Image: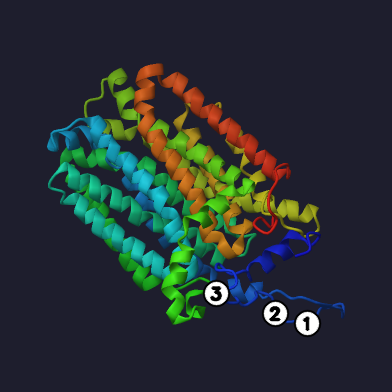
Amino acid sequence: MDATQPDSARVVADTSESLLPGLFPVESQVVPVKENSSGNSGLVSDEDELYNRFSRRRKAVFVTILSFCALLSPISSTGSLTAVPEIAAAFQTTGSVVNISNGLYTGAMGVSAFIWGSLSTLCGRRLVLLCSVLSFFAFSLGTALSPNLAAFFAFRTLSGFGGTGLLVTGPGCIGDLYKPTERGTAIGWFSSGTLVGPALGPLLGGAIVTYVNWRDIYWLQTAMAGLASVLALFAIPETIHQKQWAAIPKDRRVRETFRALNPAKLLALIGDVNILLVALASSALVWNMYSFLVPIVYVINPRLGLTTPLQSGLFYLAPGSGYLLGTFFGGRWADRVVKKWMRKRNGERRPADRLRAAVPWMGLGIPSFLSMFFQGFCQLMVFPSVGTYCLDVMPSRSAEVTAANYLLRYIFGAAGSAVVLPAVEKIGIGAFSTISAGFVAIACGGVLLVIHDKVPYTRKHTPG
């Protein structure tokens, strides 16, 4: 591909690349040459046909359902934070041991992201979505019925593995449904589920454990997963433009499936410096998020003399409200910035322009670290730009790029959950918050390098 072509042309051509190079051709997303209005020959994209298969209303319904599905796994990651003492008492252990289950859960979310992402590209979005939501339903039921600590740990970890498919498949579906200049708004609404969940979980958990049993947290989670299963089964169609599974000869499908799941493919994606820096930016925000959500109970309760989990849970309304408000602005802001820079370049679109919408809010999030509301708002202003960049930068492998992003994101989330309490006890909440803010500042610098094309990268991997 000629490097002098506009990025918009390179992005369209990139959709013709196969997930499994050399195995089978994938039909190009460009139609034959036609005459344009000036009488000159040129390529005419079939973009309208691809993205207008469903009405705007139906696509809005799809995004709403996908956002609800995306709420499930993150809300479970923090739902037990305010119930840790009760769970520890039930299993005759300590709160520190119970908190390990949250780290395992978040770690499983990261490790499983690549598996679900690769399968959604190979087998289609709908199959992966259904497998993920049904497995999350089954493992949530197992968590609610856990007879001992070992079973609780096992089902919690498996729940994290199952629920990640909902997070990875959603952006892939949005990339299939919306034009590049419209994706930011849809990703913003989808991100509301992924980010409101961690802040809403402790509030729901606190209310439940105050009035009933801690197991009812997971019964509610199971019921929500059951509803999501029904909605996904009857309301979400297949959205992928080109399902590669059908083109693989039957006698080679098993082998090629294992090839698609080769971890080396993920490492190759992360090895692209642009993708790595953007993934580290989202990882810094997730580290930031989990490291200030987890210690709320342990820091605020003693200082304010709070005695019930519900009282503690109410403090999570502040970041949750910030996430919710950011939903209305983050995606639209990302789309607006992209269109602005397209006009400056006479219609040329670059995936990195998405990141211009993120940088100001990453900077604002640093001084407002101690203000939980603005922290949540700034994060929701950043994530739609980062998420849409993952869709735009490599369209034929958008689900895998998203999976690579989620891998690093939730590994850092798990690390933040695991180290925050010992660190707060050792150096204090102020010093630890300063370290987290510094991480965000460094990540913001990496994003600026990507925007201004100051890092080396392989053009065939990163058309933008």
The three-letter amino acid code for the residue at tag 1 is Lys
Name the residue that disc number 2 marks. 31
How many other residues sit within 10 Å of disc 1, few (<14), some (14-19) or many (≥20)?
Answer: few
- Whether tag 2 and tag 3 are in contact, CB under 8 A, the answer is no
Above or below residue 150? Residue 173 is below
Query: Is the residue 73 above or below the residue 129 in the image?
Result: above
Viewer-side residue, 374 vs 416: 416
User: Given the image, on which type of amino acid does mark 2 rest?
Assistant: Val
Image location of residue 55, percent across then percent down: 53, 72
Q: Nearer the viewer, mark 3 or mark 1?
A: 3
| Count of numbered badges drawn on the protein | 3
Residue 301 placement, left or right of 284: left
Residue 319 point in image, percent of width and height: 43, 36
Q: Are there few (<14), some (14-19), or many (20+) residues within 10 Å of tag 3?
A: many
Q: Is residue 143 visible?
A: yes
What SS does tag 2 mark? loop
Q: Distance between the residues labelled 2 and 1?
A: 8 Å
Query: In the rendered view of the protein, which quadrant contains the N terminus?
Result: bottom right
The amino acid pointed to by label 3 is Gln
The CA span between labels 3 and 1 is: 23 Å
Label for residue 34? 1
